[in-house]
Amino acid sequence: MFNTIRHLLPNGRAWRATIDKILRRFLVGLGEGLQAFRVNFDDIADDLYPPTTRLLDEYEEQFGLYPSALSAEQRRDRIDAAWKARGGQSPRYIQDTLRASGFDVYVHDWWFSAGSGVSTELGSSELGPSELWSGEGGYEARNPFDVLSDSVTASGFNVVSNGEIAITNNPAAITGATGAPTGYLLVNLPTNTDYLIPADSTKWPFIIYIGGQVWGSSATIASGRRDEFEALCLKICPLQLWIGLIVEYS
């Protein structure tokens, strides 16, 4: 700090501090006193960036991030993801945001190519506009009963019949069923509302699915982060969509 101050002095013999005199001693003392301020300014500059900030709690409060048992590095990564979020409604944006927040999940859109069967590819690589869906060709809506269940509606699941296992959506086939879907609907409605899987197939294009990398497979989320995960899904997903979560909590 002494050298910084010395170079700010006027260019005259009276202001030269190259030799040991009262002016130099004064400036040396002044510089030492200002050193603490310089360190503080450096720390404040570091606080501007998630990888170096000292204020993790304050940043999490600012971005509305749930407290959870994460390491300091995971907390920094989560803050960094929230800081960089620009907004968007595409499945790719939703997937990237969730993954940047530390959730190993993938987003699958509502449709698959007609005639090809249910695609097992990553959903975000098979995006298509909903207006292409005709219900008869081109694109078909995924059947939510294959991967989602609720407490009222009969869902598709493996049913044992005559020693064989088959996939069905037949309500009469509930007896003897095994492997019921673990997925569920996440809807931004009051918690006392029953979230029923829509039987009307024209409603199926309004469901977006979040789960494992392969369509229909489950993703695993730490149980301690469930509230945080669901809140983030509801925050970034388009309001006109229902969310089908194919997730297991452990």
Image: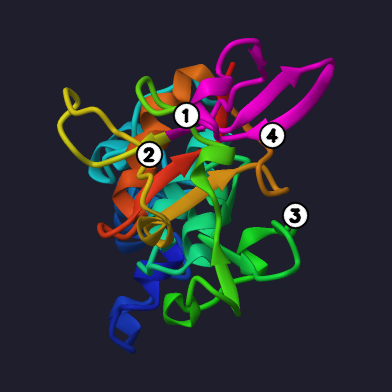
Looking at the rendering, the stretch of residues picked out in magenta corresponds to 155-184
Q: Is residue 1 above or below residue 135?
A: above
Toward the viewer: 39 or 64?
A: 64
Distance between the alpha carbons at the discs numbered 4 and 3: 17 Å
Which residue sits furthest right? 163
Q: Is residue 94 left or right of residue 21?
A: right
Residue type (three-letter) at the residue carrying disc 3:
Thr
Q: Residues within 10 Å of mark 3 (few under 14, many from 20)?
A: few
Distance between the alpha carbons at the discs numbered 2 and 1: 7 Å
Give the x, y percent position of residue 204.
Answer: 42, 56
| Disc ID at residue 197 | 2
**Which residue position holds label 3?**
120
Residue contact between numbered discs 2 and 1, judged by CB atoms under 8 Å: yes
Residue contact between numbered discs 2 and 3, judged by CB atoms under 8 Å: no
- Which tag is nearer the camera, tag 4 or tag 3? 4
Toward the viewer: 134 or 250?
A: 134
**Which residue position holds label 4?**
167
**Which residue position holds label 1?**
149
Residue contact between numbered discs 4 and 2, judged by CB atoms under 8 Å: no
Q: Is residue 231 magenta?
A: no
Q: Is residue 197 above or below residue 204?
A: above
Give the x, y percent position of residue 128.
Answer: 54, 77
